[in-house]
Image: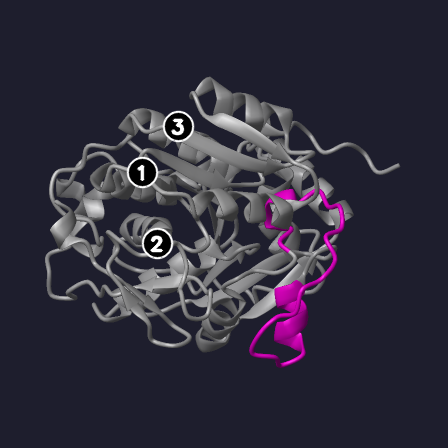
Amino acid sequence: MTHALPGYVCAEDGTRADARTAPWCCPVCGGPWDLDFTPDPNAPLEPAAGPNSLWRYGSALPLTGAFAVTLAEGNTPLVPLAERVHAKLDFLMPTLSFKDRGAVMLAELARRLAPRRVVADSSGNAGTAFAAYCARAGLECEVFVPEGTSAKKTEQMRAHGAAVRVVPGGREAAAAAAREAADLPGVFYASHVFNPYFLHGTKTYVYEVWEALGGHLPEVLVVPVGNGTLLLGAALAVEELARRGVRPPTLIAVQSAAVAPLAAAFHAGAEDAGAVPQLPTLAEGIAIPAPPRARQILAAVRKSGGTFLTVTDDAVRAAQLDLAGRGLFVEPTAAACWAAVGPTAAGNPLQDRTAVIPLCGAGAKTGLAAPAV
């Protein structure tokens, strides 16, 4: 029922809005929304007794009641990758990427709001997730993607019934086109960047790690960062679990060396990140030149005592092959974290601490990275 929906709040200026009627961004500053929601740390958290989906963490989620939208997402395996390092196989999600975690939340929210259509923008994986979950919810979906998006990903979107709009230019051009469409009447903008319900879906990644490790978290969570939806979801979960007495981990954020506005800002001591050029990189899923939630991402990493690492395309290519040699075929973006902290990484970035890395997208979506010319 829509009357029970937690509302939006702007972290920059404190503007508040009803989730049923709010514009897709803060009308005062144009920034992304946060959610006016904090789970009760005393509420029972018994995922094993819940459904076989991320809704098993219902007491920690902002949507309550009967859940009509699900593809049995979540509960992905946590497997040993190296001594003291585990990999979480989120490429085994229904649409083969971790974006299903946030997409199911936004699809369920949209189902309750009953718009005429849903629009989204994506470099690939978020679009395939929204297309699938909107199909599951019986919602009309339109996805704006930049030119050069993997043909396998756009084919998957169309297979789910979504209208795919290929936008000339890069990732920011696709986002601008989607936001223009989002201003039309009867449209729900399923933005994995601006809508905070998405972050409360991605936070289930950390809840599952906590569950798999018997009520504990590793010393380090290594997370790839473009728009920061997985990292900010992880930070939410870490804070929520800390209220239940769980020791928080350090966050290590990984960016492509070719497009690394957050890493540059972090190491310069800046509180916000300036835009950088959109250069080509194998890690296309994290190649975001101007992340709207930059301030929040930088603050979350600093609060955890963590840092930013960057990886070259050569390192990503080698990491993808190394993972494949271990039986795990992931797309290049998903190999970025292993490139940053794996056996070929410079130095000892984990400092022999226990760690979990996400393998976020399947190699079947992109194929093997081409050899360097």
Q: Earlier in the sequence, mark 1 or mark 2?
A: 1
Which of these two is toward me, 290 or 333? 290
Check if mark 2's residue and mark 3's residue have beta carbons within 8 Å: no
Residue type highlighted by circle 2: Lys
Q: Position of residue 227 (x, y in %)?
A: 53, 55
Of tags 2 and 3, which is closer to the observer?
3
Residue holding disc 3: 132
Q: Name the residue furthest right.
A: 373
Q: Is residue 81 visible?
A: no
Residue 107 numbered mark, or none:
1
Q: CA distance from mark 2 to mark 3?
A: 20 Å
Q: Look at 69% across and 45% down and name the residue there.
A: 316
Quick check: 7 left or right of 131? left
Tell whether position 233 is magenta: no
Q: Image quadrant of residue 135?
A: top left
User: Mark 1 belongs to which amino acid?
Assistant: Ala
Label 1 close to label 3 by CB (< 8 Å): no
Q: Main secondary structure of the magenta part?
A: loop
250 or 25, which lies in front?
25
| Range of residues picked out in magenta | 261-288
Q: Earlier in the sequence, mark 2 or mark 3?
A: 3
Q: In the orientation shown, which residue stands out farthest toward the top?
A: 159
Percent across and percent down for residue 134 are 35, 30
Q: Which residue is mark 2?
A: 203
Q: Quadrant of residue 288?
A: bottom right
Mark 1 or mark 3, earlier in chain: 1
Provide residue 319's location: percent of width, then percent of height. 67, 43
Local packing at callout 2 (Cα closer than 10 Å; few below 14, some 14-19, many 20+) is many
